[in-house]
Amino acid sequence: MPTIADNLAAVRARIQAAAARAGRNPGDIQLIAVSKTVPPEIVREAIAEGVTAFGESRIQAAKAKIPQLPGKLQWHFIGHLQTNKARDAVELFHTIQSVDSVRLARELDKCAGQAGRTVPVLLECNVSGESTKFGFKPDEVVAALTELNALPRLEIHGLMTMAPFFENPQDARPAFRALRELRDRLQEQHGIPLPALSMGMTNDFEIAIEEGATLVRIGTAIFHPTSGE
Ligand SMILES: *Cc1c(COP(=O)(O)O)cnc(C)c1O
């Protein structure tokens, strides 16, 4: 059975190859190892291989796990966040990638102020129009960015999306391209830099890198490589 070290080496090689195909510097692509459902002792194996950034999607599980994994790690929240969990999220996480409403952003800003910190965030956008997905619709984020950017304790670094699942990952390309174009439009209209594009998971991260991803969120290929094959 392949080890976590083997899986990581394979994922890193694929990131490098995708970056090379796109003429991009692989150092501009940050790997977020999605450790949801993964017990701390397995997460430690990834830490031993030099992974420093992890993604979690549930506050309850993160509350139990994160304190068991001290060290210089960056924890990213990537799941749907209820407003009443904003305080926990600000206490536990370095970055919140899944800000999907103005109401949540206001609450995070308030909690960040009380905690005496600023919080890097991404705005989750639903660019594929799937009704089951969370996220701002493109028109909504265009309309909300001025207000969001004025929240003093949030640093908006860019956008995040989840593409629909396709058998053929090439089919996810339009969603990734749409996120990049939305980012370009927001930067132009508002004159604020939005360098981060969090897009691409196990099934489609190479396509996302070709379309400009700066963060890829990969769980299965690192921690459960045989499930889903
Ligand atoms: C679970 C999850 C991932 C990782 O998905 P894999 O297919 O396991 O790589 C990435 N992003 C989000 C938001 C997730 O919930």
Image (cartoon, rainbow, N blue to C red):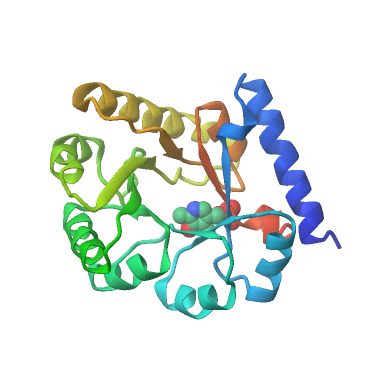
Task: Determine the residue positioned at 26% across, 30% down.
Answer: 192
State which quarter of the image contains the N terminus.
bottom right
Task: Determine the residue positioned at 30% across, 60% down.
Answer: 117
Furthest residue to the front? 116
24, above or below 3, in the image:
above
Q: Position of residue 129 (x, y in %)?
A: 31, 41
123, above or below 27, in the image:
below
Query: How many numbered marks appear?
Result: 0
In this rendering, does residue 125 appear at all?
Answer: no
Quarter of image, res 189: top left
Furthest residue to the top? 23
Give left or right: position of 189 versus 70: left
Q: Position of residue 59 (x, y in %)?
A: 40, 72
Give left or right: position of 152 versus 53: left
Task: Determine the residue positioned at 21% across, 62% down.
Answer: 113
Of the pair 136 and 69, the residue shown nearer to us: 69
Furthest residue to the bottom? 64
In this rendering, does residue 42 appear at all?
Answer: yes
Of the pair 175 and 55, the residue shown nearer to us: 55
Give left or right: position of 132 versus 76: left
